[in-house]
Image: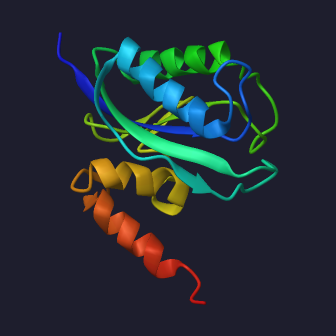
Amino acid sequence: MDKNLYGIGIGSNRPHTTHGRPQAVVEAAIARLARDFDLFDASPILLNPAFGGAGRDFANAAALVESELEPEAMLAALKFIEHEYGRRPGKAWGPRVLDLDILAWDGGDYDSRTLTIPHAALANRESALFPLAQIAPDWRVADGLALRHLAARLRARRPKN
């Protein structure tokens, strides 16, 4: 069976009883992805301000993994990992021990009732785009644009100090 390449966004802004602070949760999640899938690469961990009602700042990273799973099955596998780390359904944009999102995959555009790939907010969310662009700058995901181009556009839109 052929393997699919996925770009997975990883985030945490709450401590975990075993893994500790959010940065350590992200490190543990990367190790978990390496155990469950074929880890190709992982970005450095970045600290980002929270948005919405999430409260504390987030530790974010991205990982490239290969898997035989199709998108819906991959989403289910990621949700299972989140649940194991203590994530429970709650309000949107709320604090979370672990958040795993499929940001992109090598199968092109994917859209279902429960999943859209590339991630709908990828081009506009620094916490997702910048880590993924660090490890896959030439991956073309949105309108044929490479991640490095999307990241440059997002940087250009930042307010000037």
- Which residue shows up at 28% across the image and 40% down it? 108
Query: Number of marks in the image?
Result: 0
Which scheme is used to colour this image of the protein?
A: rainbow
Q: Is 14 left or right of 132, judged from the image as shown?
A: right
For the residue pair 105 and 115, the one nearer the viewer reads as 105
Taking the image as drawn, is residue 143 in sight? no
Specify the quadrant of the image occupied by residue 66: top left
For the residue pair 156 and 13, the one nearer the viewer reads as 13
* In the depicted structure, whether residue 136 falls above or below residue 12: below
Q: Quadrant of the N terminus?
A: top left
* In the depicted structure, whether residue 96 falls above or below residue 17: below
Q: Residue furthest bottom?
A: 161
* In the depicted structure, whether residue 23 falls above or below residue 71: below
- Which residue shows up at 50% across the image and 32% down it? 27
Specify the quadrant of the image occupied by residue 70: top left
For the residue pair 97 and 18, the one nearer the viewer reads as 18
In percent of width and height, residue 139 lies at 24, 50
Q: Is 6 left or right of 95, judged from the image as shown?
A: left
Specify the quadrant of the image occupied by residue 113: top right
In percent of width and height, residue 17 lies at 74, 20
- Which residue shows up at 34% across the image and 15% down it? 69
- Which residue shows up at 52% across the image and 62% down it? 124
In percent of width and height, residue 128 lies at 49, 50
